[in-house]
Structures are given as structure tokens and as C-alpha cells.
Amino acid sequence: MLKIKDLHASVEDKAILRGINLEVKPGEVHAIMGPNGSGKSTLASVIAGKEEYEVDKGEISLNGEDIEELSAEERAHKGIFLSFQYPVEIPGVSVTNFMKTAINETRKAKGLEDMPANEMLKMIREKAELLEIDRKFLSRSLNEGFSGGEKKRNEIFQMAMLEPKLAILDETDSGLDIDALRIVANGVNKLKSKDNAVVVITHYQRLLDYIVPDFVHVLHNGRIVKSGPKELAHELEAKGYDWIKDEVGA
Amino acid sequence: MDLKEKLVSSFMAFENSIDVDTPIHDVRSEAIKVFENKGFPSKRDEAWKYTSLNSVLKHNYSVFPKQENVLDYKEVKKYFIHDIDTYKIIFIDGKYSSHLSQTTHDGMDVCLMSSALSKPKYRLVIENYFNKAATKDSLSSLNTAFSQEGAYINIPKNKIVQKPIQIIHFSTGNESAQMLQPRNLIVVGENSHVQIIERHQSLTDNAVLTNSVTEIFANKRAIIDYYKIQNDKQTASLIDNTFIKQKRESHVSVHTFSFGGQLTRNNLNFYQEGERIDSTLKGVTIIGDKQHVDHNTLVHHIEPNCESHQDYKGIFADKATGVFNGKVLVEKEAQKTDAFQANNNILLSDKASINTKPQLEIFADDVKCSHGCTIGQLDDSAMFYMRSRGIPEKEAKALLMFAFSNNVLDSVKIPEIKQRITKIIANKLGVNIGFDL
């Protein structure tokens, strides 16, 4: 599904990714772990198409199609979803209206008619229930005044609405208490299927107890320096990141 | 001959064409002298520092309509708020169009300024109210000198006017350049409530200059909601002079939506002549190309315990320019005044500009006055967030701009107007999305 080959990326001439190789197949869950500043969030933003990041070298493809030249919205239309580490507050736009616009613009891009209003409402109701989101919450301005947990739950609610092929969860566990973490993880697990894939970016192993990865990759200094099965996450949790640094001689 | 000379010399002919034996003959004569003395304002005048009339005044305007024109309702229906029942006072090239209008004398007067000025039964009202709120500045004086036609609305006390009143001025472009000077007088009695929509619309690309004066009197506990829709062609310019006198406990709101026109100047003046008055001034300006919109507001707090709320949002693209000059004057007696003023702007291009100037003059010592102005760009992180959800760049921009204007739109009390404004904004931004936020 997602293939990344020798990806180098920089922001304002500062190299951040220095040769990433990653392949994610349908039905898989990958975890990307690593210390602060290793390039985890940059990788997420580059895949989602943030323009501030310059791809200097390498390839990113989705289902065999090169997506490097595509805009963020075009990538979204192709099924890429990024759950933001820091969801942006947009005063004046309600959660419901934002979702309606996002879904209908995605349908428009695929040559489909707008989703009928009753169908949309039904879908919103179902997905809100899945994430245990109160209906009142949906008429509030997007992320404005939301608690950390509400913001993250709202991200996964959007993921549930958009039904992406590839979901990248950037530090979705940060700012969540244990109950919210369970709700969010439960939501993600319910959305998982053999046709889609999830990339979980996290600093800690905590979330991975709930969303169990098939593969764990350790990112350090803009490169994946170690990959392994889910047990690698436990090892990192127990030993910290220093031993990896020593191992790769960085 | 420049426009000033032309106007001054036309005044005699104008006076000859109408009955000089009216109560306002002297008022007119006095007014033309003021205009002759002061002339058109220039950038040397502090209040016109950022707005030059030069390019607008250079046309050879005809100052009186030469012929009566007729418009088919179907041709102009789209400029009406047509999905609700309304009273209509419609003018074509400055002349009243009975065909397009729907006036009334049933328990109130929703009719014409020309009849109010000429018929004896209105004499007392004219003597009491005509030119009693307008200032003696040169442009208002010019309008006073030539004032003959416009809307006359007189609502007696204890009356809730069920239907909004639309005042629309069409210009057909039969003249290569035309100057219009509508004059509106609106008197609303105690405890009465009225909603008014005003629009100026040119139908061709010929130049139009409108110098309009509207005087509004809100008596005790009256409620007036006034909506100005400014979405004219880019060959049309408007100088809108509106003066509002409020008595005790009255509530008056004016919403100004400025999307069109070459040059638009809104002189909006509120005078609070009683206690516990509420004045609301709100505006959304979205312009591009070389358009110019200037909001010049005054709220004069004269008595204690009154409130005023000003909230103006501006979005400027291309080489568009904007001005906001908001003056709040609080007299020594006006204790416990609560005056709020905000002016927020987004510049979408390096060549667009806004001059914003809050001006607070406070002589009372126990008041709450606040003001704030901001100038910024669209938030990049918000843009990426929206685009990453599949909303294309243009639509994402539109949604952000719409959200930015939304708290002004939120206070529009007539849903059909809100819908219409929303549609105009969507058209203006070139998007087709529902903004039912």
C-alpha cells in the first residue's frame, strides 16, 4: 500500500529525514517509535503532503502511484489520513460542517454527488457513538476550547468518518488519560480491516498495548535504525532509547 | 467644468423645477452654500486621509435623470430578497418605480420622500425631523441641497412591522455617467420595531456615483435592524452618510456587507440621546482587484448607562484597500458607558492594505471602553489541517474566511438575508459549498 524509498526531506534547508525506507501492506499496523527530534512527525507530515517540507530525494507511493507531487487534499482523496499531534483550532466552523465539507469535497473529487443529508446524519451519529462523543460536541467550533482528550477523540472521529486506506496517527496518545486512550484505541481497532493500514507514531509503548502493531520501527536521526516485531516496543520501554543510539553508533 | 461647478450651477435649475414654497427651501439654499464653500473633501481632510475621491469625481456625471426608465421585475428579481414578503421602495435612476414597489399607508407610512416633502400632511414631520440628524459636512450638505427622492418611513408607536422593508436603487446606465443623491428619512415611534434592507445596484458598466443620506430616528424603546448590502458593479461608487438618533432604551443595529463597488465610503453616525440605549455596528468587507472600502464610524455617548458594540471584519485581496476609522466619543455625563470596538482584518496579498484607526475620546471616568484591531494572514496550519481532510485549497480558504466573518453574520436576524449574504460570499470567493456553519 505505502512504499517509501530512500526518502530525504528538509525544512528550511535543514535536513530532517535522511533516507527512510518503509513498506506498509494492507491489513498491517506499523509503529514508528523514536526519541524526540528523530523526525517522526516530519515523516507523518511529508506523507500527508505538508508543503513546508521539501522532499530532496526518494520516492513515496501509494498503491503503486507516485504521490510526491500531489497536494495534501489530493492525497486525502486517495485515502491518506493524518491524525494530528496538535489538532488546529478553527473558530467559526463546527465539527459537523467541517466533516460535511470534507466528505462532500472528497466525493466531488471522485466524481460522486454530495452525500444525502439523512445519510450523512446517520453516519455522523454512528461514528460519534463509536468514539463516545456527545452530540452537543458536534455543533461546537472545531477544536476550539477542546481538552487534549477531546481533540484526539475528534481526530479519530474524523478518521472514522473519512474511512481512509492509510491512517497515520501522530502521537495520538499524548494528552490522553487512560479512559480516553481506551476509547481512542477501541475506535481505531474497530476501523481496522484487511484492506486498510495504520501507522502509529509514538514516543511511548503505552498506546501499543491497545493498538497492537505487526511491526515496530525505531527512527533515529532521520533514519529507521531498527525494525522488529511488537516485542521491540517493550524492549524500548524497558531500556530507553540510549542503547539503540549506542548500537547504531550515533 | 468640474463636478462641483456643475452641481452648484445646476442648483438654480433644480430649484426652479420644484416648488420653492416648501418648508425645506431655506434648508436647501443653506446647504448648497455649505457645499460651495467646502467643496468635495480631499486627502487634506483628516477624515479623508486614506480615501481619495479623485478618480471617482473625474467622470462627467449627469446630475438629473433625463428620462424615466422601466425595468422588468424578472430582470432584477435576483437583487431582491424575494423569498419573503416585504415592503419595497424601489427607484430606477433616481426616480420612483411604482411598478416594482409595494408601499403602504395602512397604519404607518412606507412611501416616498418626494411626497413627504411636498404634501401638507407630512409638513410637521418634515419640520421636526428633516436634516435634524445629518451633519453639515460638505457631502451631506450637497445631498440636502438636492434632496428630493428616497424612502420615507414613519412608523407610529407600538407597532411591530411584520414585513421587512427593502429600499433598492437601480441605475440602468442610460447615461454614460450618472450621479444619484437619494435621501431617506426613517422615524420609528415608541416601542415599535422595524427591519430595513438597503441596496444600490448598477445594471451596466457605466459609471455611477451615489451620495446618499439616511436619517434615522429611534424613539423610546424602538428597535431598528438595518442591513446594507453593498455588492455593486466595480464601476459604481457609493458614499453612504447615515445618521441615527436614538432615544431612551432604544436598540438600533446596522450591518454593512461590502463586497462590491469601486469605492465605498460608509459614514455611520450614532447619537445616543437617552439612557440605556444599545447601538450595534457590524460589518463584513470582502474585496479584491482595486476596490476600496472605507468605514468611518462615530458613536456619540451622551447619556449614562448606554452600550455600543462595533465589530468589523475585513478581507482584502489583490490590490484592494480598506480603511476603518472608528470614533467613540464619551461625554462627561455618560457614566457607566460600555463601549466595545473590534476591527479584524486579513490581507490575502502583499499589495492589499488596510488602515485601521480606533479613536477613543473619553471624558467620563467610570466607563468600560475597549477596542482592538488585528491585521493578519490566513493561518497556514489551519489550511494544512483542512486540506489534509480533503478540502481543496480554494474551498479551505473560503471556509476560513467565512468562519472569520461568521460572528458578524450570526447576529443577522432575518435568515433569508443571512442565506443571501452567504451566497454572495460563496460567489465572491468562487466556491460552491454550503456554509451553514
Image (cartoon, coloured by chain):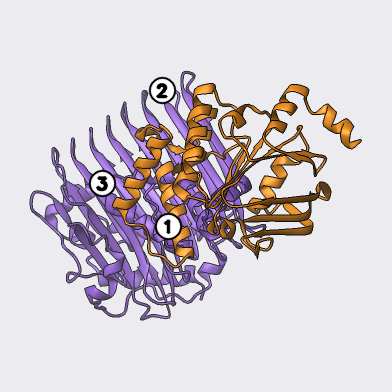
Chain colours: A orange, B purple
Q: Position of residue B346 (x, y in %)?
A: 57, 49
Mark 2 closeness class: few <14, some 14–19, many ≥20 residues within 10 Å: some
- For residue B252, say whether it is visible: yes
Residue type marked 1 = Asn
The residue that mark 3 highlights is B129
> Label 3 neighbourhood size at 10 Å, few (<14), some (14-19), many (20+)?
some
Q: Quadrant of the C terminus of chain A?
A: top right
Chain that bears disc 2: B
- Secondary structure under the numbered disc 1 in the rendered image: helix
Counting from the top left corner in percent of width and height, residue A134 is at 37, 32
Q: Amino acid at mark 3?
A: Tyr
Q: Are marks 2 and 1 on the same chain?
A: no
Residue appearing at x 19%, y 65% in the figure: B101
Q: Which residue is mark 1?
A: A104
Position above or below: B16 against B323: below
Q: Nearer the viewer, mark 2 or mark 1?
A: 1
Q: Residue at x 51, y 55 (%)?
A: B391
Taking the image as shown, residue A98 lies to the left or right of residue B110, namely right
The quarter of the picture where residue A198 lies is top right
Q: Chain of mark 3?
A: B
Q: Nearer the viewer, residue A38 or B134?
A: A38
> What kind of residue is marked 2?
Glu
* Residue that sits furthest to the right in the current view: A249
